Image (cartoon, rainbow, N blue to C red):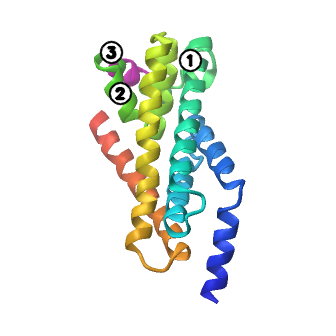
């Protein structure tokens, strides 16, 4: 029975559309923090380690490209509309996050872009402000692509490491890696909130 369930999980997650779905989730995660982009990358990393399909390198490359695209779209949005055009942008909490992003970008663009890649709401604020403050596009693109590649490698490695350590094949590795990804995300959010406070 476990073999049948594992085969069903593998077939459903390892289909040709799995990388495309992961990419959509990662791009969507750039705009909406509730979209589970990190979880998708971690789950496919676990699946890649247990079944070989999709290959781990493809998970990393596709996730990095999608993360770069999502961040660049936020940058372009910030560049075109600024950070105060729409009412949601003028909300006190959003303005507080944008002010934090401005201060951080002034002190070290590369450090902030790399760090923000791992913190969902900070990532949105940083990329909007980077566009609004007109950071030089080639420099921004190079930094964001490097940050996205590091993030993608990390997320996929978490899934692959779980799959290597936890016995039970994809049926166990995928859910455990998802729970671990959620836990790491909550921990990063908690630490970043305390540092901002």
Q: Is residue 117 visible?
A: yes
Residue 13 is drawn in which quadrant? bottom right
Residue 184 is drawn in which quadrant? bottom left
Of residue 37 and residue 167, the one placed in the foreground of this image is 167
What SS does tag 2 mark?
helix
Residue pictured at 35% horizontal, 52% vertical: 187
Q: Is residue 160 left or right of residue 81?
A: left
What's the mark number on residue 78?
1
Say above or below: 116 vs 4: above
Q: Position of residue 155 (x, y in %)?
A: 45, 51
**The N terminus - image quarter:** bottom right
Pointer 2 local density, CA inside 10 Å: few below 14, some 14–19, many at least 20:
many
Label 1, label 3: how far apart the Cα atoms are: 16 Å
Give the residues in magenta.
98-104
Q: Are marks 2 and 3 in contact (CB under 8 Å)?
A: no
Disc 2: which residue = 112
Residue 103, magenta (yes or no): yes
Label 2, label 1: how far apart the Cα atoms are: 16 Å
Helix, strand or loop: magenta stretch: helix
Label 2, label 3: how far apart the Cα atoms are: 9 Å
Q: Are marks 2 and 1 in contact (CB under 8 Å)?
A: no
What SS does tag 3 mark?
helix
Q: Earlier in the sequence, mark 2 or mark 3?
A: 3
Q: Is residue 111 left or right of residue 148?
A: left
Disc 3: which residue = 106
């Amino acid at each position: 029975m476990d073999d049948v369930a594992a085969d069903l999980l593998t077939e459903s997650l390892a289909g040709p559309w799995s990388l495309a779905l992961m990419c959509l989730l990662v791009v969507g995660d750039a705009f909406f923090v509730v979209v589970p982009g990190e979880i998708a990358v971690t789950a496919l990393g676990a699946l890649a380690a247990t079944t070989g399909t999709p290959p781990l390198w493809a998970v990393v490359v596709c996730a990095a490209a999608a993360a770069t695209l999502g961040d660049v779209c936020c940058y372009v949005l910030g560049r075109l509309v600024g950070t105060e055009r729409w009412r949601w942008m003028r909300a006190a909490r959003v303005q507080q996050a944008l002010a934090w992003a401005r201060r951080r970008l002034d002190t070290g663009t590369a450090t902030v872009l790399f760090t923000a890649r791992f913190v969902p709401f900070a990532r949105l604020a940083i990329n909007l402000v980077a566009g609004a403050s007109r950071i030089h596009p080639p420099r921004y693109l190079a930094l964001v692509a490097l940050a996205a590649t590091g993030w993608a490698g990390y997320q996929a490695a978490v899934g692959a490491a779980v799959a290597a350590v936890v016995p039970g094949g994809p049926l166990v590795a995928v859910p455990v890696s998802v729970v671990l990804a959620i836990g790491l995300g909550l921990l990063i959010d908690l630490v970043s909130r305390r540092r901002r406070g």
